Image: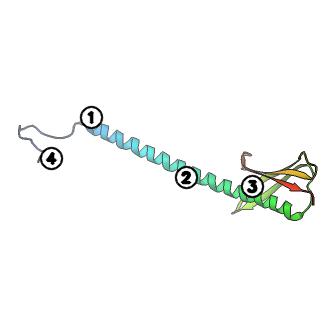
Amino acid sequence: MSRAGTRGPDGRQRGFTLLEVLVAIAIVAISLAAGLRAAGVLTDNAGRLADVTMAQWCADNQLTAMRLARAFPGVGDADFSCEQLGRTYAGKLVTRPTPNPNFRRVDAVVLDEAGHVLVTISTVLGRL
C-alpha cells in the first residue's frame, strides 16, 4: 500500500500534483457556494411566507369585521392598518358593485413596506 508523499516500487515520489489539488479545492469551493446560496434562498422564502401569512390574517380580520358589523358596505375604497406580531401592515378595502344590487364584492388588499401587494382576499357581502 503506498501513500501520498512516499516512494513507490520504481523509486519515484508519489503524491498529488499542484493542478490536482487546485481542481479539488475549486470543486469544494463551488459546492460550498451552491450550498450557501440554497440556504439563503430558503431563509428568504421563510421570511416571505411569514409576511404573507400575517398579511392574510390582517385581510381576514378586516373582512370578518365587516361581516360582523352587519352593515351593507358602500361602494368605494377605504384604507386600514393592521398589526400582527409586532409588525404593522397597510391595507385597502376595495368595495365594488355586482350585477345583483343586493350584493357587493369586497377585496382586502394588504401591502408590504415597499407598497407591493402581499395578499388579496375577496368576498361577497349581501344586504341583510
| Amino acid carrying mark 4 in the image | Arg
Residue hosting label 2: 43
Q: Real-space Cα distance between discs 2 and 3?
A: 21 Å
| Label 1 crowd (10 A; few <14 / some 14-19 / many >=20) | few
Could you tell me residue 31's position as x and y percent? 40, 44
Residue hosting label 4: 3
**Residue 22 falls in image quadrant:** top left
Local SS, label 2:
helix
Please give the name of the residue rendered at 74% of the width and 58% of the height, measured from the top-left corner. 88
Could you tell me residue 71's position as x and y percent? 92, 60
**Residue 83 falls in image quadrant:** bottom right
- Disc 1 versus disc 3: nearer the observer: 3
Q: Real-space Cα distance between discs 4 and 2?
A: 43 Å
Local SS, label 4:
loop
| Residue projecting furthest to the front | 100
Local SS, label 1:
helix
- Please tell me which of labels 4 and 2 falls first in the chain: 4
Residue hosting label 1: 19
Residue hosting label 3: 89
Quadrant housing the C terminus: bottom right
Q: Is residue 87 left or right of residue 93?
A: left
